[in-house]
Amino acid sequence: MIAKRITRRKIVDKLVSSLALLSVAIAIIPLAGVIIFVTSKGLSAINLEFFISLPKPPDEIGGGIGNAIQGTLILIGLASMVGIPIGVLSGIYLAEYGDNRFGSLVRFMADVLSGVPSIIMGLFVYVAVVLTTHSFSALSGGIALGIMMIPVIARTTEESVRLVPNSIREASMALGVRRWKTILFVVLSTAKSGIITGIMLSIARIAGETAPLLFTAFGSDVWATGLNQPISALPLVIYKYAISPYSNWQAQAWGAAFILLIMVLVLNIGVRFMARGRYRR
Amino acid sequence: MPSPLFLFGKKESKGARKFVSGDSIFKKLTLISALFILVLALLIFYELYSRSQLSISKFGLGFLTGVEWDPVHQVFGALPFIYGTVTSSIIALIIAVPISLGIAIYLSELAPRRFRSPLSFMVELLAAVPSVVYGLWGLFVMVPWIRDYLQPFLESTLGFLPLFQGPKFGIGMLAGGIILAIMIIPTISAVSREVMLAVPDTQREAAFALGATRWETIRFAVLKYARTGIFGAILLGLGRALGETMAVIMVIGNRPQISLSLFEPAYTMSGVIASEYIEATQEIYLSALIEIGLLLFIITLIMNVLARLLVWRMMRMFRGAKE
Amino acid sequence: MPERGTMQSKSGISKTMAVLAIFIIVIGTVATYYILNPKTTITLNGAGATFPEPLIKKWTSEYNKMNPSVVINYQGVGSGGGIQQIKEKVVDFAGTDAPVKDEEMTTGYLVHIPETMGAVVVAYNIPGLTGSLKLDGDTIAKIFLGNITKWNNERLVALNPELSLPDQNIFVAHRSDGSGTTYIFTDYLSAVSQEWADKVGKGKSVNWPVGVGAQGNPGVAGLVSQNPYSIGYMEIAYASLNNISYAWIKNEFSGEFIEPTLESVSKAAEGFLDQMQEDVRISIVNSPDPEAYPIASFTYILLHQELNVYGEKMNFEKSRALLNFIWWAVHEGQSYSEALLYPRLPPEVIVICEELLRSITYNGQPIITS
């Protein structure tokens, strides 16, 4: 009888393992599908000129999305400067000091904010920044993308910091390290992997957002002229070119999508490589 | 919390002042950041509320029950969109949560070590695909597949349910739910994976020592410990599903209607805002669209409350199980 | 398993901070490198309709080659967006497919300059059809109202006696995003069908009685090309560049079925020249010109009548640069239209544009005097 029970448990174990593996396979299918789709349509548009030149009208051969690449990089940088500090610091607050009513409220609001459609974030920043300055700007685009990053980064930071065992905190403070240094250097670096995952997920998401940029960064056909001026961005270009009737513009849309994917990929690999701990499960 | 430095005697008095001020500055900094989130949420709510005043005063509560969306005759009702958003998000969660958990379990517990990084990485890459690309891929690749394979299959096996009846165009609520699921899988699985990886090995070792199989270990040692983190991951996924626009509007059919069948087209709240705001010019039209945004904000709030209540209930039921 | 000590972790976190710092510095350098632009250029910003965007981009590119000190940035964020932006005085000019009514001009009178024309075609997908489908306005309205549901309906057969139409349901596709294309199409349907005018009306977004909504022209094109026995509407350039069959529409005045071409679209304007003298915003669908394609429209550039409303952002020199560009666009610019599949403005319309441009002032002074 015990043998039967053990066999049953073993079967369940094998079943679950197979299901888990199946889940991974299922997830990889659309990923492969999208990547193949984007690559097959976009590869033809990619050459050196594509990377470094400005857009051309549809009836002229050539042209490129150099300014869109520049724009996306600048916008990611600006957004990160807004989103990462506020996100990580709030996450720390929620985990370390936030077991009270105020903390619960903030936690709740962060979850709610993560569900606000990107176009509404864009409209909000439009009213707050663009209308007050009477001009589209890279800065407003960066702010719109940045505030979209905050809820995800805050919550993932919180969850990661919470999971750091108290023994680590206690050990550090027992050695005389001040509390804030304990959090900043010991706890954070233990929770590093989780925090970086949250940051990378946010960056990946905002790098591809179109709607919030329509009324803030606006788009441009020339190289970036200033943080208080309109600026181009890859998702804007992808959207505009993809809905146009011209096949060369459409191919460039896919090329731009391909480049965006590669960019986020490289960023992801780069940051993870740099931040890898020696000790990893 | 008492400072452990008191054990060090005299040294403490000079250090104590620095200790307090460094700490309190840091704490204040984190508090301000957390406050920022609250202020941001309030400002956005205020903005949405004030800009929908025109529509609120004209339609009142009828906006919530109205099923007509007619920009020409300026009759606006939100019910079909509420239905569309809630249903598509639920479908997305039903599909995405089991798959994401399966992925998280595999990547954190079961996968051979050298596959872990590349596979995790590939799943996260799903998050890097821009929404508009998902939308176009969905329209040109996924929708025909749904129309030619998935819908006939569902109709032949589960066709007695009103959920799977009706003309098969591919485009519709089902396509919308599936593409949302694909988009939220990276979020839920990546965060769950991180949370599960952070569970200390002592828990696992204790379970193994008691003779548990791998799955039993996962179930009792890891998942229980990581419970709240996984729940947080699911909430983030839900948030993303509720607010996603570009991809959904390409495949969901954009017809403001309420139908039991998942094969029928539908329309989501964020979808109609993204579709129509840019071209709307009349004040009442813009106001109605913003009111939909306000309702979405409120619905997100409600769904978060419900989710938390559900989990609280579940935790009460399981209280007493080994922690 | 023992965790590593603080020393290890500290170097880890410093490394990450170092990487982040480098990242930010690199971005900053890239950003500032291009900020060193000589301020001798005049930059003009325009926003609005996506329909004329490719042509306007051609114009801005060509004009900049001839006048390197003038940089014009037009982005197709949508007519609604363009109208909002010019009312808020965030852009110098706007593009719109649907004209703006006087009551809506809450921050200053906006002059409409028709800069090019567009046409909407009715596209269909009937496998095996041996010729082009012919339709008339009332029939199209009935299809989109849901009154005609099968391809072999008597009316369709009567219009196309030499084709064999299948006994299949018509799958109707329309736009879900607000668009000028929808505006033109529904404007036409309202003009030719009283039932449509009463029940649905015209607008950039309408309450469609039947059909599935797709995003943008590629959305509708995608639906039509993938679903046999479907029908939809889209811009002419889209249909012709993507090998989609479109119908010949009956001109109500000559009784002829007109194929949508650049010439037949231009002709639509010629049927309304007198009314245009009064108000250039007149609708030109269902044109009385016997060779005109019935589903045609202008697309307009919007300019503030009095340009000093921009305050410090505008001056006389900038106003003149702006108007010179538009003047060039409606004259020499028209030579680039056909290569991009836009109809040319008829000469009489160009004369009307000239008068309108002359009416624009800065501090009460007309800017174009020659």
Image (spheres, coloured by chain):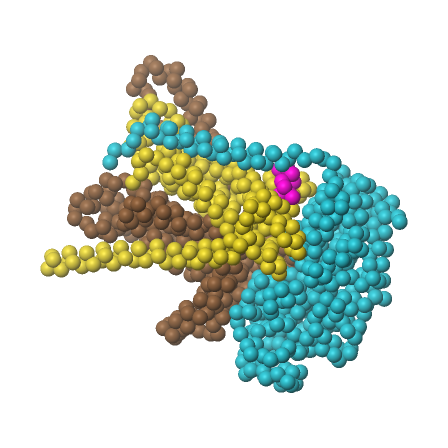
- Residue A224 highlighted magenta (yes or no): yes
Chain appearing in yellow on the rendered image: A
Corner quadrant of residue B5: top left
The answer to whether residue B267 is above or below residue A213 is: below
Residue ID at (37%, 36%): A276
**On the picture, is A248 further left or further right than C23?**
right
The answer to whether C94 appears left or right of B107 in the picture is right
Q: Which percent across, then down, holds residue C93? A: 74, 50
Percent x, y of residue A89: 45, 35
- Give the colour chain B carries in the figure: brown
Residue at left 27%, top 40%? Answer: B200
Q: Quadrant of residue B150?
A: bottom left
Determine the residue positioned at 39% across, 15% down.
Answer: B14
The quadrant of the image that shows the C terminus of chain A is top left
Residues C309 and B8: in front is C309
Q: Is residue B179 shown in magenta?
A: no
Q: Position of residue C328 (x, y in %)?
A: 79, 52
Which contiguous range is marked in magenta? A222-231
Where, by quadrant of the figure, is residue B229 drawn? top left
Q: In the figure, is residue B180 to the left or right of B317? A: right
Q: Is residue A240 left or right of residue B307?
A: right
x 38%, y 56%: residue:
A27
Q: Main secondary structure of the magenta part?
A: loop
Chain C, chosen colour in render:
cyan
Number of labels in the image equals 0
**Residue reaching furthest to the left:** A1
Q: Is residue A67 above or below residue C294?
A: above
- Residue C85 visible in image: no
